[in-house]
Image (cartoon, rainbow, N blue to C red):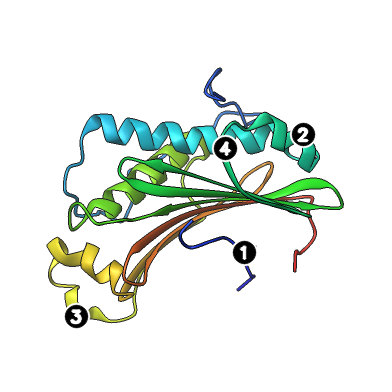
Amino acid sequence: MRRLFMIGLGLGLLGCPLQIHAEPAPEADLPAIQLPTDEISEARQAEIEREVLRFLRTLHRHWGTSQDTLRHALPDKLERDEHGKLIYSRPLTGHGVVEGYEFEDGSLVHGLCLFLQQPAHETNEFLEYYGTVKSTLISAYGVPAEDAMIWENDLYEPLPDYWGVAVQMGHLRFAASWETPEGTLSIELTGHHQSRLTIDYRYRQAGRLT
């Protein structure tokens, strides 16, 4: 498993519609994995979707550009600015968001967006977040190449109302990935005392980062 670039645990670009494909995304079937939810509000779902599209649009516009260019393009709070990495943080719907951008040979090649649950509002709240992020990506890129629900401990498997607890305890994780014209895009919902939802996008032209 490749090592993600370092991010702190504690720790308007919404203009035109996202346009990434040279051709329209393939028709998407309903996701095979059905998630129990706490029915978060439509307003919160819309905010999460905007956040995802904002992150994707930033990457789409800046792949291959310099660290200095991206630094001046983003208005968010800059937590860390070091050679090869920019890390931003901000609140979202009562939780935290950390965005990291990695540069290789002076060019942007890797982006990571991390939603951190702090504190939990509802048991299955981040399952709903994951479902919203996944649906947003399906609309943009079609069905994922990989789509998995992995039980490390099946104690809560018969109890969907507690799957969010299973994620927080590290008993359950979800993952999906896409191969896009630009690179490899993946999402993962994991947990260790708190839920963590990650969007990871690696530019196809980039070499393996260490």
Q: Which residue is mark 2?
A: 69
Mark 4 and mark 3 in contact (Cβ < 8 Å)?
no
- Mark 3 is surrounded, within 10 Å at the Cα level, by few (under 14), some (14 to 19) or many (20 or more) other residues, namely few
The quarter in which the N terminus is drawn is bottom right
Q: Amino acid at mark 1?
A: Met
The quarter in which the C terminus is drawn is bottom right
> In the rendered structure, which disc, 2 or 1, sits on the residue that comes first in sequence?
1
Q: CA distance from mark 2 to mark 4?
A: 17 Å
- Mark 1 is surrounded, within 10 Å at the Cα level, by few (under 14), some (14 to 19) or many (20 or more) other residues, namely few
* Residue 119 image point, x, y percent: 27, 56
**Numbered circles on residues, count:** 4
> In the rendered structure, which disc, 1 or 3, sits on the residue that comes first in sequence?
1
**Residue 65 vertical position relative to residue 116 in the rendered view, above or below:** above
Which residue is at 47% across, 41% downward?
137
Q: CA distance from mark 3 to mark 4?
A: 36 Å
Q: Which residue is mark 3?
A: 155
* Residue 73 image point, x, y percent: 68, 30
- Mark 2 is surrounded, within 10 Å at the Cα level, by few (under 14), some (14 to 19) or many (20 or more) other residues, namely few
Residue 6 tag number: 1
Q: Secondary structure at mark 2?
A: helix
* Residue 93 image point, x, y percent: 31, 40
> In the rendered structure, which disc, 2 or 3, sits on the residue that comes first in sequence?
2
- Mark 4 is surrounded, within 10 Å at the Cα level, by few (under 14), some (14 to 19) or many (20 or more) other residues, namely many
Q: CA distance from mark 2 to mark 1?
A: 21 Å
Residue 56 tag number: 4
Which residue is at 87% across, 52% downward?
105
Task: Please indicate whether residue 4 sits to the left or right of residue 206 in the image.
Answer: left
